[in-house]
């Protein structure tokens, strides 16, 4: 006797690559599980708040971070708050943990390549962000995404 499997708590969706739907043998490719969650959260962070005409509350609001006169440290703190608010709206995320940027000391210790990447990102007003998340299925996830103007 087989037992029914429980539904995937992270759902299914269409696979997106660089903003385009992916075809697999002429059919639309799907994504499920953790990969679906990571894709959905990445798209949410990369979408400017208010730009989705069907859901104007969807997306990341970087207005305060990038339009007010603030130091780089304050911009990062504002971005952290905005990321927590944005990622926390997904019902599959139970908690947003540590958020680090590519120029944080712990990440710079990764080596000389990390230092060069951090310098390039600062020039372009972009940061590589890592957010540690807890999910409703108690599976930890680290989201890695570029946040920029």
Image: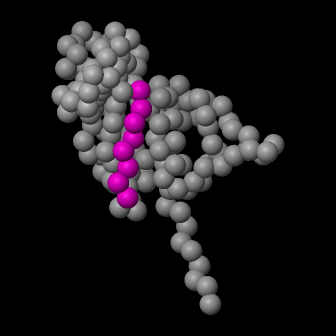
**Residue 38 visible in the current orientation:** yes
Count of marks placed on residues: 0
Residue at the far front in the pictured view: 112
Q: State yes or no: residue 74 in magenta.
A: no
Residue 141 painted magenta: yes
Q: State the image coordinates of residue 142 (x, y, percent, origin top left).
A: 36, 45
Camera-side residue: 144 or 93? 144
Extreme bottom residue here?
A: 1
Residue 50: tell me if it is visible: no
Q: Residue 59 vs residue 22: left or right?
A: left
Q: Is residue 53 above or below residue 94?
A: above
Q: Does 94 sit left or right of 22 as displayed?
A: left
What range is drawn magenta here? 139-146
Dominant secondary-structure state across the stretch colored magenta:
strand
Colouring chosen for the image of the structure: one colour
The one nearer the camera, 47 or 55, is 47
Quarter in which the N terminus is drawn: bottom right
Residue drawn at 39 percent across, 25 percent down: 147
Q: Give coordinates of residue 105: x percent, y percent.
A: 18, 28
Q: For the point 61% across and 29% down, which residue is it? A: 19
**Looking at the picture, does residue 79 appear above or below residue 90?**
above
In the picture, the quarter occupied by the C terminus is: top left
Residue 39: % across, % down: 52, 42
């Amino acid at each position: 006797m087989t037992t029914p499997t429980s539904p995937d708590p992270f759902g299914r969706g269409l696979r997106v690559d660089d903003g385009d739907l992916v075809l697999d043998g002429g059919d639309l490719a799907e994504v499920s599980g953790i990969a679906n969650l990571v894709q959905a959260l990445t798209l949410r962070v990369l979408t400017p708040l208010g730009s989705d005409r069907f859901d104007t509350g969807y997306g990341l609001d970087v207005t305060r971070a990038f339009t007010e006169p603030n130091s780089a440290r304050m911009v990062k703190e504002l971005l952290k708050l905005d990321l927590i608010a944005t990622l926390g709206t997904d019902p599959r995320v139970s908690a947003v943990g540590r958020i680090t940027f590519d120029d944080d000391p712990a990440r710079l210790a990764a080596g000389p390549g990390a230092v060069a990447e951090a310098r390039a990102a600062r020039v372009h007003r972009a940061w590589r962000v890592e957010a540690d998340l807890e999910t409703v299925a108690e599976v930890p996830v680290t989201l890695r995404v570029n946040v920029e103007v």
